[in-house]
Image: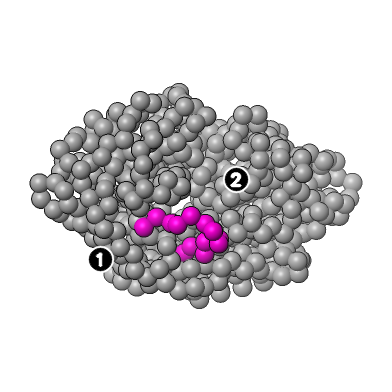
Amino acid sequence: MSAGVAYGVPPPHAAQRISAEGLSTHIQVLASDAFEGRAPATRGEELTVTYLRDQFASLGLQPGNHGDWFQTVPLVQITPDPSTRLHITGGAAPFDLASIEDVVVWNRRLTEWVSLTESELVFVGYGVSAPAVGWDDFKGMDVRGKTLVVLVNDPDYGLESGDFLGRRMTYYGRWSYKYEEAMRRGAAGVLIVHEDAPAGYPWGVVVGSWADHPRFDIPPAPGSPERLALEGWITRDATGRLFSAAGLDFATLKERARRKDFQPVPLGLKASTQMYHSLATSQSRNVLGLLPGRQRPEEVIIYMAHWDHIGKNDSLPGDKIFNGAVDNATGTAALLELAKAFTALNPAPKRSILFLATTAEESGFWGSWYYTQHPVFPLAKTVAGINFDILNVSGPTRDVVVVNRGASELEDILEDVAGPEQRYLTEEDAPEQGFFYRSDHISFAKVGVPVVYTKSGVDLVQGGIPAGQAAVRRYTLNDYHKVTDEFRPEWDLTGMAEDVRLFFELGRRLADSHRWPNWREGNEFRPIRDASRGE
């Protein structure tokens, strides 16, 4: 292995160690029935983290957490009662909204019983308070003790321009923001109106993600505000019945909510429920493998992917295992192939490379969040994060889809890398679906670390954009968060290997440089990074 390779040209054998065959091998292991869907705090976790540790060690990496391969993440496992119903009074006749059919509801108060008694229902549009653009859906209303009905996404959904970046979803559009804002205001609960297009996924994903299996949470920090008594989603049809019972037209009020002068609308209805959750404290683990830098080991580039998935549901007929082959055995396999390539470099990179396999992403990014609160490397010394989640299984593509394109200077380096490979960068096909806020990198963005996150390209070498878009649609509708997300021998992983090689070269260039890429001017995370680096 030559130490005299010119800057910007990796040793060919190192990049070529990333192969479709290697990716396939790891995906088949991680997504096998033996791993039981890789849920945290299960036998599936034990098998998964042991496999990752052993693979990292066999490649010559060092334990990445101060001599430990693992970072322990405290969790609370919450199993909701699937028979929970929401009782509505105040209209012409009382009625119930049924669990799964009409609503999916839970709470995060970490107590077994929670009651919601005759909480007033108020429609608050998108539930957004954004002083920077003069937007306030609450207009001073005291919502303490009330249950808010809110629209998913943000007020610019479907528009080319507006106060909220037009088609591109902002954080105001994410379900997590809706709950956070309501909690800050002392509301009792939130029901988010689910519609497939603005949510970016069908109702089955809501059921599969929140209703059909135990969820995980992080114990609240001392002094934290009390969590909502009710968090949940409501179907479009059930919302129509709710508004009809209030003598209101949902479509009319939904349109009114797109205006700045929107006023919250009390529905004249009340919601009640008794929720039982079985609770169990547990622990899970992030897995960390480290390649120390040879010159500036205190500076680090982080490659990340979540190893967890949904696990299994014994109440299902037939197949009970959510194997999570695409989501996210693909990204986890990419970490292992990247480690194989980086450990082949001679000399080693000047900066350190940390391979971070996170837990509990599917329950709220808890593994990545925990790392950012307890970082191994100071955040100010973390050069960048590169996240892998749901990679391409459909063959080579001409494009590289950058989620939230234009956010950071990392894209400039990626463009330099992609050009010689006859690849081009493009933005995601549906920026209104808010993919940038739907994976682990967002935990790092919130603390200022520049990150890049890509999705499967859609301009397939064989079939072009129509074929690529059709493949993405098929996966979203048929397999995403379903038991059918399994390894398929007919997959073409050569495109995935090409993508991972691009990101190998992106990280290698960063690791052998003095560059400190930042968020672009005007980005919401730029001030956080500037303050961090200034310290």
Q: Main secondary structure of the magenta part?
A: loop
**Mark 2 crowd level (few <14, some 14–19, many ≥20, 10 Å Cα):** some
Instruction: From the top left corner, tell me how far across and down residue 160 is, in percent.
Output: 43, 24
Q: Which class describes the residues within 10 Å of circle 1: few (<14), some (14-19), or many (20+)?
A: few
Q: Is residue 218 magenta?
A: yes
Instruction: Give the residue drawn at x 74%, y 61%.
Output: 290
Please tell me in which quadrant of the rendered image residue 506 appears.
top right
Q: Relative to 502, is 358 above or below?
A: below
- Residue occupying image coordinates x 36% and y 58%: 229
Q: Amino acid at mark 1?
A: Ser
Q: Quadrant of the C terminus?
A: top right
Per the rendered image, the range of residues in magenta is 216-229
Q: Amino acid at mark 2?
A: Lys
Q: Above or below — where is 286 with respect to 326?
A: below
Q: Which residue is mark 2?
A: 446
Question: Which residue does the numbered mark 1 point to in the structure image?
Answer: 83
Task: Inspect this view and state whether residue 188 appears.
Answer: yes
Residue drawn 36% across the image and 48% down it = 144
Side (left or right) of 82 relative to 452: left
Sequence-first tag of 2 and 1: 1
Residue at the (20%, 46%) spot, across then down:
269
